[in-house]
Image (cartoon, rainbow, N blue to C red):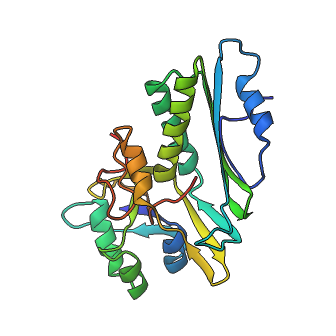
């Protein structure tokens, strides 16, 4: 069974199964790095009970595919997988998985971080938080643009952040 | 020219999901010119697409600069800065 390497879905995902599928029967893979993002709920500053995630069907998949191609051009990537959930997610639930396989750990770590920095600022997802005071759209962060800028890619996402046309060139 | 408009997140809440429109551009058929034209369509449009609001543009499902030239049949999306991941 092989699922697409980019998937947008409402359902949760099984991290172990995804990583196993990424590796498959290959014996040239020496490293698999992964990142799992979760709904941060109750913190000192915030009291978020749930998130509702909206996306732009069609564009989302294309944008993430294009990011993976960029990661393949920059790093020694042997395989990659991105699963992102949409819909209503409760505090603590998984939102996103980014996993990269490579020969050595450095490429896997770097490509994984690069993909997350890219996804945060260039993939068309929007989060709405549910709090005791009602619902509110999450603001984009300049720090996320700065994270992408470390790779030499202009983001142009957050207001007042790094310039650029958002196309990464 | 015929365009398919799409709005997302807070813009979708103010303006609806979008739809097909017929637009007769002036000098330049850019995304910026379209945004200016849309602002004149209703007070809700004027507010949601106000120049000081951070709005990103995608043309044919790829992020674009506001100076991007639009073609007949293009799908043009306006949305707030993205916040996924």
Toward the viewer: A95 or A59?
A95
Q: Which quarter of the rendering shows the N terminus of chain A?
A: top right
Toward the viewer: B41 or A166?
A166
Residue drawn at x 41%, y 45% is: A148
State left or right for residue A64 relative to residue B63. right
Q: Quadrant of residue A108?
A: top right
Q: Position of residue B71 (x, y in %)?
A: 34, 53
State left or right for residue A51 relative to residue B27. right
Residue drawn at x 70%, y 69% is: A50
State left or right for residue A48 relative to residue B25. right
Task: Name above or below for residue B85 compared with residue B2.
Answer: above
Q: Position of residue B49 (x, y in %)?
A: 37, 74
Q: Quadrant of residue A26?
A: top right
Q: Position of residue A29 (x, y in %)?
A: 65, 17
Q: Which quarter of the rendering shows the C terminus of chain A?
A: top left
Q: Residue furthest left?
A: B27
Task: Name above or below for residue A64 compared with residue A51.
Answer: above
Q: Residue furthest bottom?
A: B43
Task: Please say whether residue B24 is visible from this viewpoint.
Answer: no
Count every numbered label the image shows and give the total: 0
Q: Position of residue A118 (x, y in %)?
A: 47, 44
Task: Name above or below for residue B58 compared with residue A23.
Answer: below
Q: Residue furthest front?
A: A44
Task: Please say whether residue B49 is visible from this viewpoint.
Answer: yes
Toward the viewer: A157 or A36?
A36
Residue drawn at x 42%, y 55% is: A143
């Amino acid at each position: 069974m092989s699922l697409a390497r980019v998937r947008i879905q409402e359902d949760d995902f099984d991290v172990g199964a995804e990583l196993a599928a990424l590796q498959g029967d290959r014996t040239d893979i020496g490293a698999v790095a992964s990142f799992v993002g979760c709904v941060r709920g109750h913190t000192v500053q915030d009291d978020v009970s749930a998130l509702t995630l909206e996306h732009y069907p069609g564009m989302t998949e294309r944008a993430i595919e294009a990011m993976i191609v960029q990661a393949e051009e920059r790093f020694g990537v042997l395989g990659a997988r991105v699963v992102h959930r949409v819909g209503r997610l409760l505090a603590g639930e998984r939102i996103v998985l980014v996993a990269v396989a490579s020969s050595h750990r450095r490429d896997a770590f770097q490509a994984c971080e690069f993909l997350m920095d890219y996804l945060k600022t260039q993939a068309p997802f929007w989060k709405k938080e549910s709090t005791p005071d009602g619902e509110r759209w999450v603001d984009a962060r300049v720090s996320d643009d700065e994270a992408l800028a470390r790779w030499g890619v202009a983001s142009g996402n957050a207001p007042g952040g790094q310039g650029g046309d958002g196309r990464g060139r | 020219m015929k365009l398919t408009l799409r709005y997302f997140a807070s813009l979708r809440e103010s303006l609806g999901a979008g739809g097909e429109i017929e637009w007769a551009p002036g000098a330049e058929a850019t995304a910026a010119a379209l945004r200016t034209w849309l602002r004149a369509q209703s007070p809700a449009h004027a507010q949601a697409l106000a120049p000081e609001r951070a709005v990103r543009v995608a043309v044919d499902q790829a992020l674009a600069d506001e100076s991007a030239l639009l073609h007949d049949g293009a799908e043009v999306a306006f949305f707030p800065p993205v916040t996924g991941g």
